[in-house]
Amino acid sequence: MSHFKLACLGLWVSLGVALPARADEGIGKRVRRFVADTHFNGVVLVGQGSRAEYVEAFGVGDAAAKQPITRNSRFFMGSVSKWLTSIIALRLVDEGTLALDTPLLTYLPEYRADTGKQLTLRHLMSHGSGLPNGLMDAYKKDPGIEKETRPQAEAVALYASGDLVSAPGERFDYNLSNWILVQAVLERVSGQSYARLAQRLVFKPLRMADSGIAAGEAGTIPNLALGYRSLEPKVERRVYTLPNYLVAGGGFYSTADDMLRLNHGVLAGQLLSPASKKALFTIERPESSYALGGRVRRIGTEGKDAQDLASNDGTCGAYRTLSWRGLGDGRTVVILSSLRPDDEKLFAFAESLLSPPNSKR
């Protein structure tokens, strides 16, 4: 069966079980143009507040099994995992277990003392630690480490303990090694695995029943949309793998509906205290609009059309995901793909969907 026929099958299924009864036709037409233009393979959701106004699924979830993507398909979220991790950390702050500005050495006393006295969780979660990216350096020498498993403490020593290359808080440097340390701290102070923490502190209270944590596709994840490097002219899989000690930075998988629950629960609900919610959206690194685990940026240019946006997106293997929510109007766009689209077209399309019907923006 061709990719086109499978895409049509996915569309038929989504129309049968996924679309709300009162979908906005204007949005639907825009979405279908985007799908046709980019050969999009995934799910698009547009919501207002806690309600999904439009959801539609397109394409192939498992080409070998001839299964289409549906509204309930799960996707790896890539770097949106870092935003989730920051939420988990702030939940522990609210419980009195952590503080963002306490020296790292307090939580990991075996860590090197000179650096541990300077670094804090705020530095790590805002990519302002000044640490070298030891994990990426090791990966360049041996790409096979993406499949390795090792104790968290060992990963910290190997990949996140190098000499500082800049003073903590001095500059932004997107660095995966930061999240090895963050995961180590969260697991140490709680006595729980990162996956258990995510379940207890976020997924269960927000009723995110289709979300979880995994080291890539190594395990069995029901309803997972498999990642593809290409679907035509031939099918070529791209399997996503991740070290167990980095799941805090890329091991989150979810569905479009659960991402709406996460956005609404954090931004309009009671999951975080007012102080922690403020911390989550305070920009720490203005040069990259980076707050804690994600970006906050302004869209629109004047008057009521201008607002701040919680702007989270991720890339991992074949997965390309986007989760944006207006901090003022509560409008949410979630786009989940298992066949990477063109980024320029993806971002322009997402911004167009943030405009409610009849908006000038």
Image (cartoon, grey):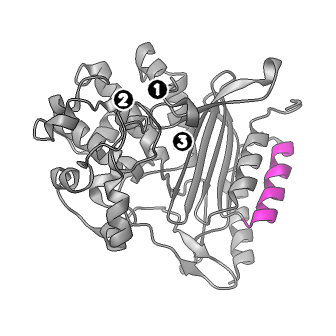
Residue extending furthest toward the top: 274
**Residue 263: x, y in percent?**
54, 33
In the image, is 190 to the left or to the right of 55? left
| Disc 3/disc 2 C-alpha distance (Å) | 24 Å
**Residue 338: x, y in percent?**
58, 63
Locate the N terminus and report the quarter of the image it occupies: bottom right
Work out whether 51 lies above or below 248. above
Classed neighbour count for the residue bearing mark 3: other residues with Cα under 10 Å, few (<14), some (14–19), many (≥20): many
The numbered mark, 3 or 2, whose residue comes first in the sequence reads 2
In the image, is 294 to the left or to the right of 87? right
**Residue 47: x, y in percent?**
67, 36
| Disc 3/disc 1 C-alpha distance (Å) | 17 Å
- Magenta residues, dominant SS class: helix
Locate the C terminus and report the quarter of the image it occupies: top right
Q: Is residue 28 magenta?
A: yes
Q: Which residue is mark 3?
A: 259
Q: Is residue 215 visible to us here?
A: no
Q: Are marks 2 and 1 in contact (CB under 8 Å)?
A: no
Task: Please identify the quarter of the rendering in which residue 112 is found.
Answer: top left
Work out whether 97 lies above or below 194. above
| Res 88 label | none
| Res 122 label | 2
Which is more toward the observer, 49 or 9?
Answer: 49
Q: Secondary structure at mark 2?
A: helix
Identify the residue at image location x=61%, y=63%.
Answer: 69
The numbered mark, 2 or 1, whose residue comes first in the sequence reads 2
**Residue 10: x, y in percent?**
68, 66
Residue extent of the magenta highlight: 25-39
Residue type (three-letter) at the residue carrying disc 3 = Met
Residue type (three-letter) at the residue carrying disc 1 = Leu
Q: Are marks 3 and 2 in contact (CB under 8 Å)?
A: no
